[in-house]
Image: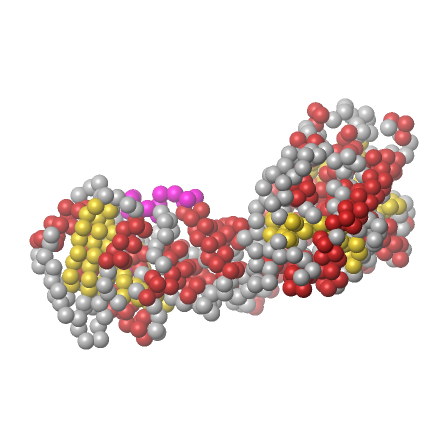
Amino acid sequence: MPPTLDVRPMPNSPLVSVIMPVYNHERYVVAAMESVFAQTHRPIEFIIIDDGSKDASAATVRERLDRTPLPEGITVHFESRPNKGAHVTINEGLAQATGDYLSILNSDDAYLPNRLERCLSEAQAQEARMAFSYVEPIGDDGTPLGVEHPWRHWYADVILQELDASPSISSLLLQYNIGISTGNFLFHRSLLEDVGVFEDFRYAHDVDFLLRVCLVEEPIIVREALYLYRFHGANTISENDRKIGLEYEEIVYRYLTRTLIEPPRNPFAPSLDRWPHVFSSTPILPHLAKALDRLVKEPTDTTQPAETSNKTANDFPSPDGRRVTLVSHELSYSGAPVLLRDVAKALRREGVTCDVLSLQGGPLVKEFADIGCKVATEGPFTLFLGRVGRFSRRMSHDGRIPTLLRRVLARGAWLFEGVANRLRRWRLAARRTRGPILINSFASWPIALDLLEKRRDDPAFWYIHETYDPRIFIRTPRLYSRFQSLVDSGTVTLLFGSDATRSVWAKTGFDGHVRYWSGMPRALMASDAPVKKPKRVVLSVQSTGTRKGTWGLLEAFALGRREGWIPSDVELRIVGCHPPSWNTFSRDLLRRAHEDDLRGAVRLVGTVEPHLLEAHYREAEVYVQTSIMECLPLALLNAMAHGLPIVSTDADGCREAIIDGRTGRLVPPRQVRQLARAIGDLLEDPDTARTLGKAAQTAFQETFALEATVQPLLETLFPTSNSRK
């Protein structure tokens, strides 16, 4: 064993324990040791643990300790043992340490001579228990990296974020590890009692420890480069960027989960209800976006897909010569695009060839292609122009940018977005084929007007699902006049998804025909085998938002639990939540769902592929539709098809499907108490619930099933070819 020298601590100079795990760093370990011996602070307890190095690191440490006496005021404890990993070795050193303050040093890095003194002084002056400093990056030979080195550029950007953009170090750590390394930490030993030891992360245990500290208190930065951070070929951090990203994602996910369970003690620590602009005003890096989105539960496939979900073009009848162009504003899994997908399937079964034009792409592109539809969306050039325009517009609102430059950016945004929109419309309009055209959703108007004016000789139909005045969308007299001219001239016939929607539009001078559509057969293809229900579930399927009444649903469920109308063993399951990485409303829902009166009783599920919804409907005991404005939601019709007892708001088309007391229960929108009582009544009275569910299923089969809706749509699109049915 090397000699040790015990020195009595100097007055008002606390003992600092430096823990140095060593692994395969024989070239650098002596320099690391010398940097500790050269510290201006005393006393120091230096704990060195060789973690089973395969090179001569252990022998090199012993040789240095034996060669010269230790400096005054420094004691050394050294051991070498089999490999256990970095975090285990650090934790062993922390357990052995007796100092008031603890510091870690990587065996390939080094301290500058006054590092411990400066960090300790700042920590005591600011009454902080965690401190770290700026770092100086050095190369394999110990010389500073050049100013052109990419890492220097990255680090400079992080420092600028800390100085000029981020409201706190805690907030910055969710995106960037400004602490850089465990070797850059100095902290009071009492922190270990509050946050625990280092956890089992190979690459990012430093970030994990820092973020757990941030839950308790805000770290401080000493704005001096006091730590030499070495770059060489054997750096662990250079091994695998993907794995590092996965660890960072997991760490941030754990942090955010803790903030949902209990508010951080640190007032500067970000959470979903604190420092909201941290998440919305700066670009969110992939690991943070994924961690946020994991807070909404990922859907799982617990049932077999519906019969048609795996069909391909070869499974449909040969084309009979009829052809239709289907137009959409997007191809996501939201209601209107899914409806159009189901229309395409139904038409393909009847031998109709379908071409699809969409302003934006999405996951349904593949599904349309699989059933034999030709799909055209915006090209890469217009996509690029649109992104540049949106970026310019966002930057034009950044107050840190000079006013003149912001005006230039705003003008550029107008130019880029305008050119992109014009090219997008020209490109799609040129791809329309002969035959009827069916435009889905009034949101498709930016392409629809061009298409209709370009081809006036084929019948055209506009399927409207929006239950409000068209002037809400089209706000210039010129565009509105174009739309009105197309309707008045008979160039386009308006179709409506519900009579309520038709009534609203008729009041503004635009009438048409109601064509109900669900896309589902009378007899669902799911298995009739009983489903094991581990808990009672109140289900709502919705793309969460104000229009869907999601917040009111949460408050009604909470009120029902408090009043005893809804039993404590019932789960509220909301399926279709938008990713919280970009949707601020979803973050609000997460926060509310984790408050004391709802914690553990609400399950928020992300967007689910349509065929995976089957499991959720089959596990539900009651279905709830809480929209404040609605044409006729597919999710509600799906619940009717499954024979579920339903509580719905009486918004627009919902009251055409649900008759209060006959096919379900109706309540006014945003009336929390009435909604809570209605849900509780159906849970309490299963006989009435079954009766209402059965009546809803019968109403669906008679009015909304495929068998009742396909033929009217075919007669509308092809009035002279009905005999082909």
Q: How many marks?
A: 0
Quick check: 503 above or below 308?
Answer: below
Q: Residue at x 26, y 44 (%)?
A: 83
Foreground residue, 476 or 310? 310
Q: Which stretch is magenta?
A: 227-243
Q: Quadrant of residue 97?
A: bottom left
Q: Position of residue 307 (x, y in %)?
A: 70, 31
Q: Is residue 237 magenta?
A: yes
Q: Residue at x 64, y 53 (%)?
A: 570
Q: Is residue 33 magenta?
A: no
Q: Residue at x 17, y 43 (%)?
A: 56
Q: Position of residue 467 (x, y in %)?
A: 80, 54
Foreground residue, 356 or 663? 663
Q: Quadrant of residue 365?
A: top right
The C terminus lies in quadrant:
top right
Camera sees residue 607: yes
Report whether 20 appears left or right of 546.
left
Quick check: 626 above or below 635?
Answer: below
Camera sees residue 473: no
Q: What colouring does the structure picture have? A: secondary structure
Q: Residue at x 29, y 57 (%)?
A: 183
Q: Quadrant of residue 369?
A: top right
Q: Position of residue 635 (x, y in %)?
A: 73, 46
